[in-house]
Image (cartoon, rainbow, N blue to C red):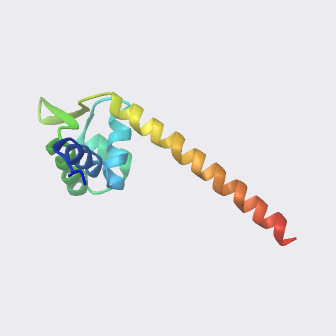
Amino acid sequence: MPTIGELQTFKAEFFRALGHPVRIRLVEELGQGERTVAELQQALGIPQPLVSQQLAVLRGRELVSTRKAGANVVYTLRDPLLSELLGVARRIFENRLSDTTAMLRALRREAR
């Protein structure tokens, strides 16, 4: 039986970095352009320490990069394809929800 290789481990770590709702929202926001922590905090409506903590995870996996702008740290996606990846995932979810909605309608018709 084949063993799990380094490439599969790398892929799993990549997706694990996206495996938190706040990190997904951060990537969605950064897909619209660079932002400061304060801007991200305001956009997500969550405490600054949580934003910073989740940005640190994304930074540690090299999904976001930073630059200093005066007293602020500005975050940006390292690769714009990350936004495209989330767009593809969104389409998959829409397909699944469409199937579920269709089954729900059929179930309701069946109950009549």
Tell me which residue sits at (57%, 45%) in the image: 94
Quadrant of residue 14 within the rendered picture: top left
- Whether 41 is drawn above or below 67: the answer is below
Q: Position of residue 56 (x, y in %)?
A: 16, 48
Where, quadrant-wise, is the C terminus in this rendering? bottom right
Q: Is 76 on the left-hand or right-hand side of 98?
A: left
Q: Nearer the viewer, residue 48 or 107?
A: 107
Q: Is 75 on the left-hand or right-hand side of 109?
A: left
What is the total number of numbered labels drawn onto the structure image? Answer: 0
Q: Position of residue 15 (x, y in %)?
A: 30, 47
Quadrant of residue 31 within the rendered picture: top left
- Whether 66 is drawn above or below 15: the answer is above
Q: Is 57 on the left-hand or right-hand side of 79?
A: left
Tell me which residue sits at (34%, 29%) in the image: 81
Tell me which residue sits at (23%, 53%) in the image: 48
Q: Nearer the viewer, residue 112 or 36?
A: 112
Q: Position of residue 64 (x, y in %)?
A: 22, 36
Name the outermost residue toward the right.
112
Q: Nearer the viewer, residue 40 or 87?
A: 87
Name the outermost residue toward the front.
1
Where, quadrant-wise, is the N terminus in this rendering? bottom left
